[in-house]
Amino acid sequence: MLSIDRRSFIKFAGAAGALQAVAGCASLGGRASIGRVVVIGGGFGGATAAKYLKKWEPGLDVTLVERNPRFISCPMSNLVLAGAQRIEDLTLGYEGLEKYGVRLVQDEALAFDPEKKQVRLARGEPLPYDRLIVAPGIDFLYDRIPGLNNPEAQAQVLHAWKAGPQTVALRRQLEALPDGGVFAIVIPKAAYRCPPGPYERASLVAHYFKQAKPRAKILILDANPDIVSKKGLFLKAWQELYPGTIEYRPNHELEDFHLASRTARFQVQDVKADLFNVIPAQRAGAIASPLITANQQWCGVEFLGFESVAIPGVHVIGDAILAAPAMPKSGFMANNHAKVAADAVIAALTGRAINPEPIIANTCYSFVSDAEAMHVASVHKYDPSQKTLVAVAGAGGLSSARSDLEGQHAHAWANNIWADTLK
Amino acid sequence: MPTNLLTPLAATLLLATLALPAQAAPTRYQVRAWAASCAACHGTDGSGKPGTHRLAGREQDELITALREFKAGKRPATVMHQHAKGYSDEQLELLAAWFAAQPKP
């Protein structure tokens, strides 16, 4: 209760300051602003937050800082590996956000100063803020894999877990793999970005091999004790569509990698393959380092507004957070986090009460061929007694079976969420 | 605590707390925030890009009936039956009313 009062106090104090700022601007003849919000990171979380802040409260000054010139979607990017989509099909511009009045800054955010309330940039002048939303996505923990902890090794052993040049490069490596070769996917321990993604990748590479190199094999080396997501649906698809192509080995946590001999070293054994795709363990993106509270990886937040538990006035959304129970690190969730955070930021800056019962949802589609997909869905509702978002019992679930219809739904979902995030 | 020790700020906070009972009827901001979740599949404000159902500007009764039937498992669906079960009947009614009130794109 005390902490809630303190939070209220911070918000009321912030609102009072904002009102003074409005009066000040008006007297100077400038544009009246309710407050300045800086959003760091233009992925599914950050871009959605910037859009909805302006859509819902046009009186805010909203600046989105993103280092890349264009948005490239991780969802659907495994289809590029299968040759079923081009990277251009998953690439969108940020210009759609300008019609809402979002100020776009293509730059690298280096750090933020919670005392001065400003974001330091690699090239531009520091950006002052009243509220900050940090949506940095993930960084990779290559320091846990000594043999890959250098740029030369990383240029050869790809992650392709951020869509873009790595996706295209991995497709080229797959094309160059001889028929009869072995492609190995190394999966880190959960929590990582996109729980079903590695298994979707194995399925779609198997789809490609079936067409182009039917004697090639796929080896899944998983740090987890079992398939993390959609297990039954994936196993059925592998058995029915790609019999004998995919071998799954659990409890394989990567300890090192020997580049010259193409050998992955696990506690249980050493494994050689012709082509490796190593998805390293992950943490919140570097800019969020001062906000990391859990396991030196993730940023703890409260779930009424995704405000950091480490630094008040700073919100963290997307893959970088320490997720609530049963909440996957997905683009859908990041998009939904963003709206709760945007609403909470507006509430704080305008002095209205925060939404006491956020409800968000998730649907993750996975393709198992160029046409067939299946989903997992969940609904997450705020529980005041546990002070977190909990998956609603009886809601959500899996596809009854993979289907072409769900493949069509997956494409429709992508087109809708890209537009909801960027247009 | 004697009232004469209440600072103006504390008094403001107390009033603010009293004005926000835990079981207040959902505000329009709350319904808007709930509806925003649906936009990930159904487009911003339910505007519906091709391949999904547009929700904006549909008849309220039509939307309520569909949501109730999804929740009860009486309407064929791939995923909507799983989402509808996550909401109370009142929340589904508020969402239907909200989408019905959005302009057709």
Image: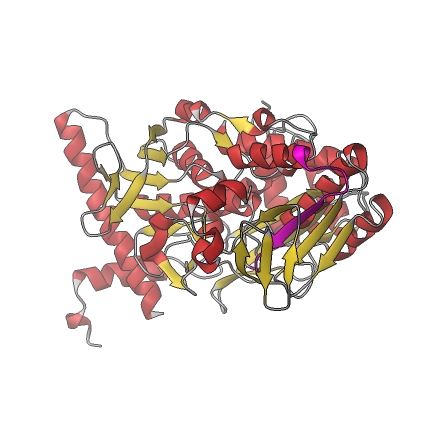
Q: How was this image coloured?
A: secondary structure
User: Looking at the image, which is closer to me, A322 or A285?
Assistant: A285
Q: Residue at x 76, y 54 (%)?
A: A247
Farthest bottom residue in view: B1
Residue A325 x %, y %: 56, 63
Quarter of the figure that contains the N terminus of chain A: bottom left
Q: Residue at x 32, y 51 (%)?
A: A314
Look at the picture and state if B37 lies above or below A98: below
A187 inside magenta stretch:
yes
Farthest left residue in view: A28
User: Looking at the image, which is closer to me, A403 or A175?
Assistant: A175
A422 inside magenta stretch:
no
Residue B45 x %, y %: 55, 33
* Residue A413 quadrant: top right
Farthest front residue in view: A260
Q: Work out whether residue A36 can be spotted.
A: yes
Residue A155 x %, y %: 49, 40
Residue A33 located left or right of residue B28: left
Look at the picture and state if A199 lies above or below A108: below
**Residue segment shown in magenta:** A175-190
Q: Residue at x 60, y 42 (%)?
A: B95
Q: How many marks?
A: 0
Q: Work out whether residue A326 can be spotted.
A: no
Residue B79 x %, y %: 73, 45
* Residue A130 quadrant: top left
Residue A321 located left or right of residue B96: left
User: Looking at the image, which is closer to me, A375 or B56?
Assistant: A375
Look at the picture and state if A382 lies above or below A194: below
Residue A419 located left or right of residue A371: left
User: Looking at the image, which is closer to me, B96 or A93?
Assistant: A93
